[in-house]
Image (spheres, rainbow, N blue to C red):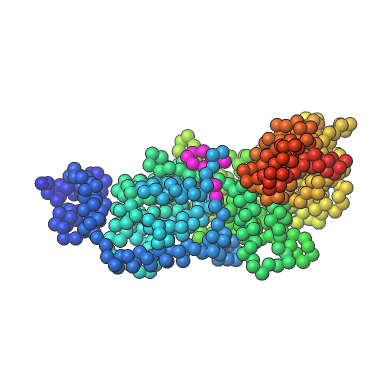
Amino acid sequence: MPSTRAVAEGVRNRGTELSHTTIAQIFSGSRVPRWGALKAVVEFLGGAEEEFRQLWISAKGGDDATDDYLRNYREFVRMEYGRTTVPNFAERQRAQLRDIFVAPLFSKGEGDSRDGSVYLDDLQSTVSAPGSKTVLLADQGAGKTMTCRFLMLQHAGLDSSFVPFYLSGREFFDLSLPLVDLVEASLLRVMPLRPPNNFVQGLLVKGSALIIIDGLDEVSDLAVRRTLSSQIESFCNVYPMTRVLVTSRLTDYGVVRLDPALFLEYRILPLSRMQAGDLVNRIFALDDAGHPGKLTAAEFFGLIDRVTDIWRTPLLLSHAAALSGRLPSGEFRYHCAEIVNKVVELATFDWDVVRGIQTAALSRYLVRRVLEDLALWYAKRGGQAVALSQVSDYISDTVAEAEGRRGWALVDNLVEYFSGRANVISVVGVNDVGDELYSFTHTAILAHMAASRIVREDRNPNVIARFLVENLQLELPASVLVFVLQIFDDSVMRGGEILFAEMADIIARLPPGEDGNLGAMLLAASRFVRMSNPSVLKSIAKRITPAGAVVEGYSLPEVIEKLELLPGQAERWLDSGEIAASINGVHPGGRYAFKDVLILAVAVRLWDLGVREDKIRDVLNFLRQMPLEQIRSSFLIGDSSGIHVMKPMLAMSAVKRGQGFFGIDLELVAKNVGERLA
């Protein structure tokens, strides 16, 4: 039999730090040791691990005090996680989790496509399996924490076969504490009663616990994160029957990745339009009393529909929905750029105050100004991620030039501040030499801050118009154009209309073939600009169209006007590519043929009937493959199994048999569309 010192040395060589005194206590049987310590000794001595695990469970036993503590803990978890703060830092409104939570869709494995997407039930089934090890990945604000809270609530019931524990990523900064101790500490935050001896250890060894580690990415130091990842993997090996769920931002997970042979990956997909509408309606429903300025979901999406980064991200969408409304005059309380600006304030600077990131050395004005400069710099590079050293050099040049000596002193603070940001600047990978690469987390925030910088630089509409025309042809995102128009409209009377006309004049004078898609981009942005004279838009469209050209089909503004569509009804399908302009010709960006408009009208009608978005997309894909005359002579019949395209005789038979919930005569739809376009 080796000495206690020899056993301690052998265990230490295998990665577990135990003193010879602890080894002596294990051999003496004076008290029940921690399972991790006993397991390490058994492995070193070549014992039967499973046999000793059963003996350890029997020695630990159970008592009434443990059962009472467990019942109380489950009740406290239900109270703690049954309610949540609505993601609106302006009001910090509390709501029942089940009233605000919209179950996301997931992809399984390394793919991020909606093809083969799975529902929340699939994730729950995986997480609930004994010994499961799962990683949940998503972009910032996509719903990782809300999903974790939902799982905590689901498994807090007395009928659950295991006990859930929640740890935030911020709790991992203390490397001196083992993960087991952090789990025990999480108990005291939920319920201020110290657990019985070996309470957590017993659950872990028996495989009766679910450990949720939410926000591995919040550990910004990559060296520390690597150490923590190793600790998590070691914990999983010590307690193989324990369920573990780890969440992280998708953007930088690949930099420090948990063992893919041990952890199964799930990814939260961006919100579909139907899920986004569900979330907006839930947020609007929280205002039980209602108010005259309340918007409908359709009106709300008409405001922000072009900014897909907003409505496809639950956190940003919640901010935007809470800010929407009408003034007593009937006008919208805020237009798109104003909403995004306030979302930027809420999701960045106000969130800094909540998390304590703001420092006394950094004024809000300075941070905003530098971020705007940085955003335009990024936007002109096509949003391409760059090394932190390049970010530091750029900030040094801009801040030091503006602030003098004080600027040089602030550079380090600013670089540290931006590199630690979860809502604005994110690590998205590493380059060939191992440098971390940073980029803006949300394209909407990038575009809005870049637009603010463009307007701040020069208030001359001709200068701004020339800058936009030149850079939109290169790498500048199209969403910057919308924001510049609206921000300039707020700064100068009729500024949006004036700037719009300036850009149209410049585009019209470009040599043939050099205008690219600029005309179409400008016309698409027209719906976001207040025009004092509606005829201005038509004259601008005419100036953009080459002289003498025969224009076929219909422009997007014409389609919206003639079909009398509400804001957002067309863009829902056009932005996703489900319906595209089939006539390119000489008109910038293409124009819509009659068949395109007919299919759009069908999509709008099915949506108004409450048909699921994925079912509508199936119908649109089918109709696109059909000749126009065949579409005209068809019926749509909807039943519990889906939407069916049928010949009139078959459709009538189906209706007589009571098969369909509804029917749409596409010949009548085509006739109605033709009359409106005439």
User: Does residue 572 appear in the picture of this structure?
Assistant: no
Residue located 26% across and 46% down the image? 15
Residue located 45% across and 43% down the image? 265
Residue 122 colored in magenta in the image: no
As drawn, 11 above or below 364: above
Instruction: Tell me if 607 is positioned left or right of 152 in this view.
Output: right
- Viewer-closest of 336 and 373: 336
Image: magenta residue range: 104-114
- Viewer-closest of 175 and 205: 205
Figure label count: 0
Instruction: Tell me if 313 is positioned left or right of 577 in this view.
Output: left
- Viewer-closest of 549 and 144: 144
> In the picture, which quadrant includes the C terminus?
top right
User: Does residue 197 appear in the picture of this structure?
Assistant: yes
As drawn, 211 above or below 67: above
Q: Residue furthest left?
A: 1
Residue 376 in percent (x, y) is at: 64, 46
Residue located 16% across and 60% down the image? 30
- Viewer-closest of 68 and 402: 68
Residue located 68% across and 50% down the image? 610
Residue 538 in percent (x, y) is at: 86, 44
Q: Main secondary structure of the magenta part?
A: loop
Q: Residue furthest front?
A: 657
Residue 633 in percent (x, y) is at: 78, 35
Residue 109 colored in magenta in the image: yes
Residue 166 in percent (x, y) is at: 42, 57
Instruction: Tell me if 524 is positioned left or right of 443 in this view.
Output: right
